[in-house]
Amino acid sequence: MLLHMHPDWETIMEELRRAGIDCRLAGKADGTRFVDVRRLKPSMVIEQGTLYVMEDGCGVPGGPRILCPGAAQADVLDALIEMFRRFQAQERQLDELVYQNAGLRELCEAGSAQLDNPICIHDDWFVMIARSAELPEVLPPDYIMASSREFIPRIIIDDFKNDSEYLETYSYRETQLWESSPNQPPCLYMNLWEGEIYRGRLLVVRYHRDFRRADYRLTELLAQRALQLLNRKQLGVDRPHRSADDIVYDLLEGRDVASREAGELTRMLGWGRDDPMLCIRMRGQQADDSILMAHALHSELFRAFPQGYILFSDRQQSVVLNLSREEGSLADIRHRLAPLCRDYCLYAGLSAPVKGLREWPVAWREAGYALEKAFTLRSERWMLPFPDCALDALLDSLQPPMQPVHLVAPELLTLMAHDAAHDTRYFETLRAYLLLERDIPRTSERLIIHRTTLLYRLRKINELVPVNLDDPWKRLYLIFSLKILEREGKNNSPFAP
């Protein structure tokens, strides 16, 4: 729903006082916002959402009223008309910028002029995506670091990202006041929420004047219009705006990305187009509506993987790691991830390493498959690397009418049928023998039978299904068939290695 600069009772009283008119509220203020103002006349049809000027003030006939003792009716009416005209002009200017596909920077400049205070917008990675020109003069020198993309320095993020009061600010959907410390100016802030997705934050920094009641509503309008521009992906006539997250998601999903955008992204990150990378995708084991918990985890991921690119969307946290920038091995990466999976009760899917931007979609799909497989298994394995479930992915990729069961080696089916008919254990014997790499002592121990018994069974198996187990490709086919039977639930042997 599009927001409008329609004043409420408190805003009207504040504007009247600014015009030098003393006033007070008679009755209980409700949530009404007013669209227009008129002088009350006899026999007038009362319209909802209209503020009426009466002999002693203004209000709604039969409802709450603002009394203005000692003020002339004409003065009250003039002050209110000027207020409505100003609010309408402010709203019209912002809507024209959106209609003209203006940039976020132009929106910040317009809002800064209306609020008489500087404005900035940062995304969910604390990257400044737009600001009014005056902002660097207002904030402390170390607040914004100059680079190809301006951002709030990590040292400041580390100071407040685990602060419980700051984490609570993510949950608000209306304009709020943030007073962080005596050394930094207070800010009005409005979160850029798109449904359940946090896109960033718009901030108005108090510098020239104190905040007014109307500033809260105007900040909400600015944030909503900023989201409209972001959704249009258009910040200028010729230059489409796409945040770093937009570009990264397109690369991961395999959508077309302009070479200029990919180049800007890699330059911003300091990555090479052919660098090896790995993708991690994670989600809570149980449905959790806690926004604070999600953003606390987001901050922890920044701490665990300071060189990585962290994404948060649709209740799923994702990390893109450049392996040429990461210290340690793949085991070290899993070691850093393990306590987060434990503390936040997550399942995580990890891709295999891939090379370069062209293979990002492969890593994204591998991590997604491993994550869904972890949810399916519901085992103690909270982190599941894709190589550990690659065979399942291969089998799941089969197209009808081909089914995995159609690929099972007929020799195994023959042994299973013979066991069922003659109460033998040839299938489980061959299974253990193959999976234990044809090691006679280990197989005998696993099956709890004598070595002579094992050799006897192997001879009988060879008589029933002559198969050359010295052929590595034949062994691979048999083992692959065992995997299929395990998936299909047709291998009930208690002797699984």
Image: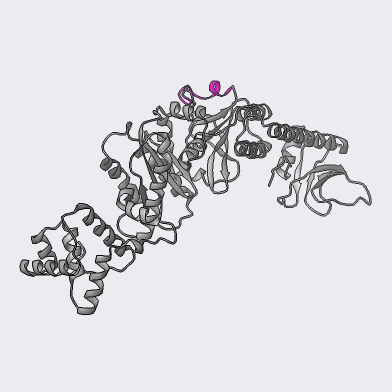
Magenta segment includes 45: no
Tag count: 0
The picture places residue 452, in percent across and down from the top left corner, at 5, 68
Relative to 111, does residue 430 appear above or below in the rendering? Answer: below
Magenta segment includes 135: yes
The residue furthest right is 43
The picture places residue 145, in percent across and down from the top left corner, at 46, 24
The picture places residue 390, in percent across and down from the top left corner, at 33, 51
The chief SS type of the magenta part is loop
The picture places residue 335, in percent across and down from the top left corner, at 27, 44
The residue nearer to you, when weighing 104 against 69, is: 104
The residue nearer to you, when weighing 473 against 110, is: 473
The residue nearer to you, when weighing 65 against 300, is: 300
Q: Which residue does the image show at 30% across and 69% down from the upper left?
A: 490
Tell me, yes or no, if residue 362 can be seen here: yes
Please provide the residue range marked out in magenta: 134-144
Q: Quadrant of residue 113?
A: top right
